[in-house]
Image (cartoon, coloured by chain):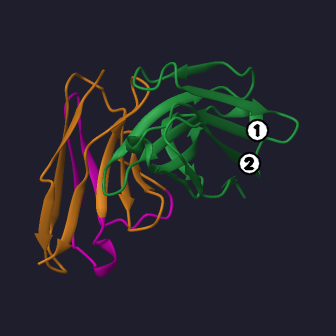
């Protein structure tokens, strides 16, 4: 069965960086694009960007361009999302999600990683 | 960027009620729209994709309709398990979500 297992919660100071991992299993890792989303406390869902695990190609939302880096390790079927220059507004739950072959909707979600930015 | 606007933001309803949530896109997205249900502390769950296709395992009381810029999610007879927040998502141009509709107990 498809599983996306994310790394644990993080507490960071303003200006720091955070790196979240997302380990995929139960399917061929390189066959499905992956997106990263985030959700601030009590708020809606925000799309951050996309990575093609096959070749590592990425495309980032304008809002995060310059601060976000998405990478993958095909040997371990793991994705990484690094966000730099953290500010309090980056406090949120971060999700990795798998894109389906028939469209960019999300059946499979990671469990989420809570990032708290606080001095 | 395509903007998605949901209405209402909050909806109060009773078990057994028919509930309709609307989602409007700032430009045509054909039928590239999905609906999700989210409960507190959980990741969202896919209900509907391609505007009207029911995801496997989702109860048939959920249905979706629309195309172009206007879409609806209907719950034909609200059940206790359906009190949650619902989001629409366009996926014709990467991804954008509506701001959510909270369905609460009346």
Q: Which residues are magenta?
A: B56-84
- Please tell me whether residue B62 belongs to the stretch shown in magenta: yes
Q: Which class describes the residues within 10 Å of circle 2: few (<14), some (14-19), or many (20+)?
A: some
Query: How far apart in space, not on screen, are marks 1 and 2 (Cα)?
Result: 10 Å
Q: Which class describes the residues within 10 Å of circle 1: few (<14), some (14-19), or many (20+)?
A: many
Q: Which chain is green?
A: A
The answer to whether mark 1 and mark 2 are in CB contact below 8 A is no
Residue beneath disc 1: A29
Is B11 left or right of A53, judged from the image as shown?
left
Chain ID, mark 1: A
- Please tell me whether residue A21 belongs to the stretch shown in magenta: no
| Vertical placement of residue A104 versus B88, above or below | above
- Mark 1 or mark 2: name the one nearer the start of the chain: 2
- Look at 51% across and 31% down and name the residue there: A85
State the hue of chain B: orange
Q: Residue A7: x, y in percent? A: 68, 54
Residue beneath disc 2: A23
* Closer to the camera in the image, B75 or A64: A64
* Closer to the camera in the image, A65 or B78: A65
Quarter assignment of residue B65: top left
């Amino acid at each position: 069965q498809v599983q996306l297992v994310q790394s644990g919660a993080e507490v960071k100071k303003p200006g720091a960086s955070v790196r979240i991992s997302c380990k995929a299993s139960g399917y061929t890792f390189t066959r499905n694009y992956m997106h990263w989303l985030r959700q601030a406390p009590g708020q809606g869902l925000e799309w951050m960007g996309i990575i093609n695990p096959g070749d590592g190609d990425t495309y980032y939302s304008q809002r995060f361009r310059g601060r976000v880096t998405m990478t993958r390790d095909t040997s371990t079927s793991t994705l990484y999302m690094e966000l730099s220059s953290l500010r309090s507004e980056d406090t949120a739950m971060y999700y990795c999600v798998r894109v389906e072959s028939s469209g960019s909707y999300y059946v499979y979600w990671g469990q989420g990683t809570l990032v708290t930015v606080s001095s | 960027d395509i903007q998605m606007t949901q209405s209402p933001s909050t909806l109060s309803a009773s078990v057994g009620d028919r509930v309709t949530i609307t989602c409007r896109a700032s430009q045509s997205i054909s039928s590239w729209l999905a609906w999700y249900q989210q409960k507190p502390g959980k990741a969202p769950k896919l209900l509907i994709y391609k505007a009207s296709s029911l995801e496997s395992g989702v109860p048939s009381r959920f249905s979706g309709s629309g195309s172009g810029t206007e879409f609806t999610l209907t719950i034909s007879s609200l059940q206790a398990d359906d009190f949650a927040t619902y989001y629409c998502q366009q996926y014709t141009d990467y991804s954008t979500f509506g701001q959510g509709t909270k369905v609460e107990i009346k």
